[in-house]
Amino acid sequence: MLQTGFRLEHRAREARFWELLRQGLGRTAACDAVGVDRRQGYRWVKAAGGRNPFAHKPRSDRRLSHEGRLQLADLRLAARAFV
């Protein structure tokens, strides 16, 4: 049980670290803010390939929503009825 709590706290610190970097803080300052050694921050950056693993990818507008798919299906069925 203790191990799980430690992991959650560690992940929360890492997520906060990446958030601070995204806001423009330097790596050393971000490490100080979350309370980890700067070498740990280096390891996080290296392990992630320099990219924020917690960043949410924006959804593309090119994909149809479920409602959009249903509307297209209805239109296709209506078009078949006229043929």
Image (cartoon, grey):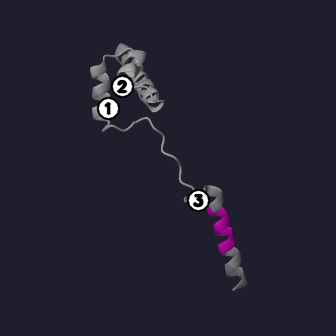
Residue at point 61%, 56% (across, down): 66
Based on the displayed image, in which of its 4 quarters is residue 76 positioned?
A: bottom right
Q: Earlier in the sequence, mark 2 or mark 1?
A: 2
Q: Earlier in the sequence, mark 2 or mark 3?
A: 2
The kind of residue on which mark 1 rests is: Val
Q: Is residue 50 left or right of residue 82?
A: left
Residue 5 magenta-drawn? no
Name the quadrant of the C terminus.
bottom right
The residue carrying mark 1 is 45
Based on the displayed image, in which of its 4 quarters is residue 41 positioned?
A: top left
The residue carrying mark 3 is 64
Secondary structure of the residue carrying tag 2 is helix
Tell me, yes or no, whether the two marked residues, 2 and 1, touch with CB atoms within 8 Å.
yes
Secondary structure of the residue carrying tag 3 is loop
Segment tinted magenta in the rendering: 69-76
Residue at point 29%, 27% (across, down): 42
Q: Position of residue 38 (x, y in %)?
A: 30, 20
For the residues labelled 2 and 3, the Cα–Cα distance comes to 39 Å
The residue lying toward the viewer, choosing from 52 and 83, is: 52
The residue carrying mark 2 is 27
